[in-house]
Amino acid sequence: MSLDLTIENELDAIHSVTFDELVDYLTTIEATGKCEACGNFGWSINLKSGGKPGISEIRSLDTPDMILAFVLMCKKCGNLRTSSAKFVAKKIIESRASKS
């Protein structure tokens, strides 16, 4: 099943992702493995009030383009890993649909 997110529902989809869903997804794709900078396995995710994962903006200096991202930070060295919030939200929503 493929889901196309439009600009109208993209933010709603991203904001619907729960902390547990994000952690489950990132664990499934092995994005929470060893830090490439220091070898640590501990990661933190910024949380908004209400316990939802924080969403960061990544902007280009050369264009007006912006990417929304979920960011993981290594608890030992501060190394950052980013995942496209739109891509992750789409995968999580597809997973929800396949379970119902």
Image (cartoon, rainbow, N blue to C red):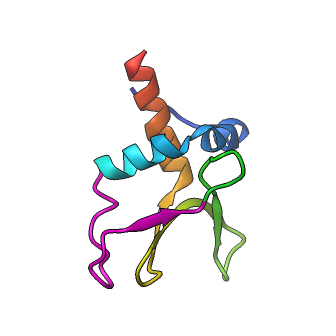
- Asked whether residue 78 appears in the rendered view, the answer is yes
Does the rendering let one see residue 2?
A: no
Magenta segment main secondary structure:
loop
- Using the image as rendered, state which of residue 95 and residue 9 is in the foreground: 95
Q: Is residue 7 magenta?
A: no
Is 44 a magenta residue? yes
Percent coordinates x, y for residue 68 in the rendering: 62, 59
Query: What segment carries the magenta color?
Result: 29-46
| Image quarter of the N terminus | top left
Q: Quadrant of the C terminus?
A: top left
Q: Position of residue 82 (x, y in %)?
A: 48, 66
Q: Residue at x 61, y 62 (%)?
A: 67
How many numbered marks have been drawn onto this rendered protein structure?
Answer: 0
Q: Residue at x 59, y 37 (%)?
A: 5
Q: Is residue 77 left or right of residue 34?
A: right
Where is residue 2 drawn, in percent x and y?
43, 31
Q: Nearer the viewer, residue 84 or 38?
A: 38
Give the answer, above or below, for where 4 lies relative to 61: above
Residue 31 position in % (x across, y down): 33, 60
